[in-house]
Image (spheres, rainbow, N blue to C red):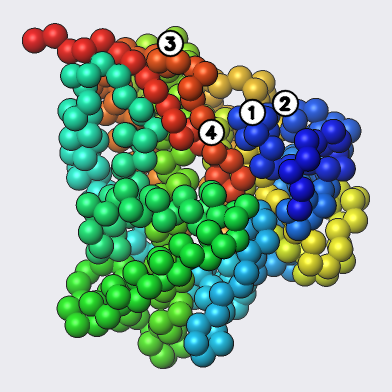
Amino acid sequence: MTTEPVTDWEADYDIFDPGFVNDPYPVWEELRPKCPVPHTDRWGGSHMPSTFETVTAVARDAVNFTSYEVSVAPVPIAYDEDGNRRRSIIASDAPEHMPERRLMLPFFSPKMVEKYREPTRSLCRHLIRGFIEKGEVDAGGQYARQIPPRVIAEILGIDPDMSDTFTMWVQNVLEFGLTDPELREKYRLIIEDFFKEEVVKRRENPGDDLLSILLDSELDGEPVPDYIVLANANLMLVAGIDTTWSSIGSAIWHLASHPEDRQRLVENPEMLDIAIEEFLRAYSPVTMARLASNDTEIAGCPVDHNDRVLLSFPAANRDPQMFENPEDVIIDREQNRHVAFGAGPHRCLGSNLARMEMQIAIGTFLEMIPEFELADPEKVTWAGGQVRGPRDLPVKFPTPTL
């Protein structure tokens, strides 16, 4: 691993490079035509296909690429006291993957997600009322960051008032912990211990939450093992917070930077759903990884057994071979088969929930604060690596008149 500046993005890229985190799109735009599958030895080594075709091909190829480890940088494999690998559905392969995924599918169906729509709207209005009189807000930390952990807490049956704590845990695992293994392991264990206590509570007083349902379910005629329950509860917390927080924040950043798009959505709120699909395409937050199951290739580039391959869905969604004028954010784009939620058997389980949260969070913000702009573009900060999105997002707006 190295922190030396990048001088050759084809042979030595760095996904944690500050310039790349702040604006990765020019790098991919330059690489696609001349080096569609660059390689690096940094952070354990990896390949990074950047076209729609190559990214989706790897995502769908469960024969040559395993989901055993999906982090963009190497992380230790965790085992329980009985030697079972703590694996969630996101880090499992056939034949285990699909039966375990089916256990959770009902919680993320359109019908189930709909029950959280009005509570999410109430939450967003409550958050906005807390800062609307001030005429300014960190829309990343005080708004976008506050919504997903509370919704996920409701699904898991845990205390939504712990939202700031949950988000801090997630950041230390998924953001800061990717380049600091000790920090990541510390907070992984904190989350694991938290859910162990929650499992004990559910066994004593079961409810209708996801944890209770998993504990009451069966796999192959046997109760779902605790290590699978714990790993998937961990997944829901980690994957359900940072990704949606980043997507909401990116959309607000765009609207604060592009007044013409903000005004169009204020005047035509019926456009919001299609605009959200464009925000998801243009500012896709997630990069996943696969390990090569054997010696193989991607677009003619050799990939050795156990090599890490980064599935940069953000890069795929800016590919000019798939999207017309991909660098332009066109909020009424008609043809938009983006892969912000991934592709193949591991396509995001929570896509319905994420879309609903974005619809409500952005729609409510526009309804209550129709005019806003960046308070200081230089003070906007971005996180990157596994999940890219704005962290500090200061915006200003006129205070309401009575």
The kind of residue tagged 2 is Pro
- Are the residues at dot 2 and dot 3 in contact (C-beta closer than 8 Å)? no
Residue 294 percent across, percent down from the top left? 83, 69
Callout 4 amino acid: Trp
User: Residue, x 41% and y 67% (percent of image)?
Assistant: 190
Name the kind of residue labelled 3 in the image: Pro
Q: Viewer-proximal residue, 319 or 243?
A: 243
Mark number, residue 259: 3
Residue 28 image offset from top left, x and y in percent: 74, 33
First in residue order: circle 4 vs circle 2: 2
* Camera sees residue 110: no
Q: Which residue is mark 1?
A: 23
Q: Earlier in the sequence, mark 1 or mark 4?
A: 1
For the residues labelled 1 and 2, the Cα–Cα distance comes to 7 Å
- Cα separation between marks 4 and 2: 16 Å
Residue in front for this viewpoint, 67 or 376: 376
Q: Kindly report the distance in space between the C-alpha atoms of the residues bearing marks 3 and 1.
A: 21 Å
Q: Could you say which is closer to the camera, residue 137 or residue 47? A: 137
